[in-house]
Image (cartoon, grey):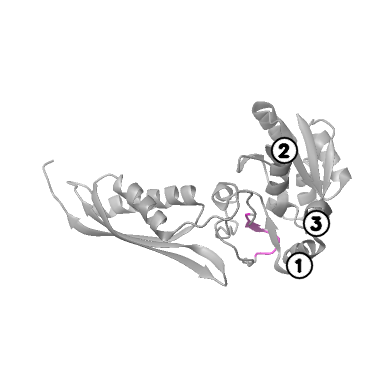
Amino acid sequence: MEVIALVGQSGTGKSHRALMVANEYQADAIIDDGILIRDGKIVAGKSAKHEKSKIMAVRRAIFVLPGHAEEVMEALREDMPNRILIIGTSDNMVGKIAKKLGLPAISQIVRIEDVATPAEMEKAHEVRMKKGMHIIPVPSIELAPHFSGYLIDPIRSFFYGGRKRRRLGEKSIVRPVFSYYGKLIIDNKAIADIVRYIVGSSEGVRKVTDIKVEQITEDDEHRGLVIVCSVVLAVYGKNIPQLIMGIQNETKKKLELQTGMVVRKLNVNVKALVVGAK
């Protein structure tokens, strides 16, 4: 197992560029802010953003709180990544993290100055200091189970550009705008086809019609999807409101998983009801 590090002062955009550096150096796992990330998922650990004081946040980030290092070490033993990228504010910090987690000595340190321009670092610092925003390099749909009670911004995913985010002190959790897959735009027709397939595969649905998709933007920021569709049901002895609610919940979950977009509203109208034999 090889260990590399990305080092830079707080607020210079390290987490924002974590995926880029991990991809360039073929690191298949990232340790950032107290959590272990692999394949876009939080595998183990607890983010320092959970802590209520800066002192505790630092202790969490360097894995000195009871049980924290052990949890991540166990996950590393089970997963055995080939190369790990550790993100920190100094050589000393990343070295302490590697030692605390029982990892090999860091073989290479990448400086934030090597992967970001002075203007980009200044912009990142401004966003952190003035807007209180912090990035965690995983999708917001992955963050949700780990940050219950936190404000998780609507995805500003690699599907769309834009530079603004909401504010919630240092507890704003956002995903990176960078993706080494490049820019990808999902057309409304493609989203409608996904909705047609998911809803059409649901229990009691005979036909899906009149699908309308609207992508909400605000100041060039993608704020989510509003979807309306109609269905023809073929059910008998079922509670139709409960059935429709189940279809809405399942469609929202699957659509967000497949597209990375946030579904703000999903209306399912019952256009007709076909009553057959029991």
Look at the image and give the residue range highlighted in magenta: 168-175
The residue beneath circle 2 is 68
Q: If you read the primary sequence from the N terminus, does the residue marked by circle 2 or circle 3 appear first?
A: 3
Q: Residue furthest right?
A: 92
Q: If you read the primary sequence from the N terminus, does the residue marked by circle 3 or circle 1 appear first?
A: 3
Tell me which residue sits at (42%, 52%) in the image.
252
226 sits to left or right of 96: left
Q: Residue furthest left?
A: 277
Q: Which residue is nearer to you in this view: 116 or 240?
A: 116
Position above or below: 132 against 21: below
For the C terminus, the image quarter is top left
Residue 5 place in picture, x, y as percent:
80, 42
Position above or below: 61 against 218: above
Whether residue 86 is in magenta: the answer is no
Mark 1: which amino acid? Glu
Distance from Cα at disc 2 to Cα at disc 3: 22 Å
Which mark, by number, is residue 126?
A: 1
